[in-house]
């Protein structure tokens, strides 16, 4: 498994990162441990989680994912594991996590200490702001007309993250669901005040959502703050199982169709079919082609994959060894030009 620098840090992460949001919802604690064991036996050294997981977000399953990882981690050599988690930002739907739910110094301390306790570790390798406090396009929203009444507290947040790195509680920090403006403003504050810069941006990126290429990719390349791609299979839509009648009632798009609106609809299904058919034309599995496309982006540090069983996990991890042909890549771009970003 290829190791890459996590942005401008000296932390080496595997090209494939194990996403864990199914732990505690679709996966039991034993399932979680089996996935973690398999991933680490096959070259993965990077785990991504969040305080609010499992997904879909529920009060009943809140924190289970971190707890399951913690019971596994306590039996591992901590230095061999690159562990990332996230603090949840403001949302009316999850106000039961904290009150107020914000990025104040107190909230960050409470959230981080909770994650460390559940994960049974005294530090995180990467701590991320799950989404901005301010009003921004995210989770399927294509744009904004109103920036809201947000009070610019970015300097306070950046200063706090800097202090956490210097205290040893986190090795470095990153952003998630962030915009070019937000990223560059944060980097400017870091430069002016000599504060530690974020190393990564965890945003959605896939064949069905290449919005990152319009602005954020240049930021990644010029500032060396690289992408951690989530949802690279568009919630399973790019696996082909829904098009080839291989899906099950327990699959996420079937079980939680009310939660994944950005990936549903006949037009999205039909566009995804074009990528599925293209993969089969070139003798790739749809999953291999979709993940390999993401894996080879020059601005990527790691591709966050998720699975509900070991068969899926094996195929996802094996994508690290697949390279798409130039001919296939040209056809991918032709589809994208005709049907750009149906799942932003």
Image: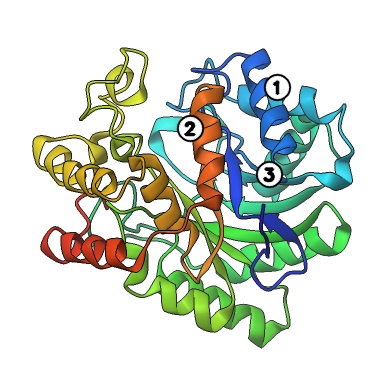
Mark earlier in primary sequence (2, 1): 1
Q: Which is in the foreground here, disc 2 or disc 3? A: 3
**Secondary structure found at label 2:** loop
Label 2 environment density (alpha carbons within 10 Å; few <14, some 14–19, many ≥20): some
**In percent of the image, x 53 and y 46: which residue is there?**
304
Report whether 261 appears left or right of 224: left
Gap in angstroms between the C-alphas marked 2 and 3 = 34 Å
Instruction: State if disc 1 and disc 3 touch (CB < 8 Å).
Output: no
Residue 147 relative to residue 98: left or right: left
* Residue beneath the point at 55% across and 17% down: 27
Give the spatial CA distance, label 3 vs label 1.
14 Å
- The residue wearing badge 3 is 44
* 67 with respect to 332 (left or right): right
Image position, residue 164 (x, y; %): 79, 58
Secondary structure beneath disc 3?
loop
Sequence-wise, which precedes: disc 2 or disc 3?
A: 3
- For disc 1, the marked residue is 33
């Amino acid at each position: 498994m290829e190791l890459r620098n996590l942005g401008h840090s000296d932390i080496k992460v595997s090209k494939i990162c194990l996403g864990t949001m199914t732990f505690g919802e679709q996966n039991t604690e034993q399932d979680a441990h089996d996935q973690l064991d398999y991933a680490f036996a096959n070259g993965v050294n990077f785990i991504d989680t969040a305080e609010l997981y499992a997904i879909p977000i529920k009060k009943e399953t809140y924190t289970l994912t971190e707890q399951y990882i913690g019971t596994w981690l306590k039996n591992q050599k901590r230095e061999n594991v690159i562990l990332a988690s996230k603090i949840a930002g403001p949302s009316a739907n999850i106000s039961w996590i904290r009150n107020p739910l914000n990025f104040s110094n107190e909230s960050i301390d409470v959230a981080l200490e909770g994650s460390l306790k559940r994960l049974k570790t005294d530090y995180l390798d990467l701590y991320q702001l799950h989404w901005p406090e301010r009003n921004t396009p995210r989770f399927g929203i294509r744009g904004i007309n109103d920036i809201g009444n947000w009070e610019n507290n970015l300097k306070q947040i950046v200063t706090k993250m800097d202090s956490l790195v210097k205290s040893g509680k986190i090795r470095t920090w990153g952003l998630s669901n962030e915009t070019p403006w937000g990223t560059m403003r944060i980097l400017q504050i870091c430069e002016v005040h000599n504060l530690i810069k974020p190393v990564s941006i965890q945003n959605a990126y896939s064949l069905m959502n290449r919005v990152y290429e319009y602005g954020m990719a240049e930021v990644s390349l010029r500032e060396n703050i690289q992408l951690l791609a989530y949802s690279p299979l568009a919630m399973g839509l790019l696996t082909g199982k829904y098009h080839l009648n291989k899906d099950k009632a327990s699959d996420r798009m079937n079980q939680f169709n009310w939660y994944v609106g950005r990936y549903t609809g006949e037009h999205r299904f039909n566009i995804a079919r074009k990528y599925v058919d293209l993969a089969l034309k070139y003798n790739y599995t749809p999953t291999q082609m979709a993940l390999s496309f993401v894996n080879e982006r020059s601005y990527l540090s790691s591709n966050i994959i998720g699975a509900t069983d070991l068969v899926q996990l094996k195929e996802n991890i094996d994508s690290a060894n697949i390279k798409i042909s130039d001919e296939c890549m040209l056809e991918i771009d032709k589809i994208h030009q005709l049907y750009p970003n149906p799942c932003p």
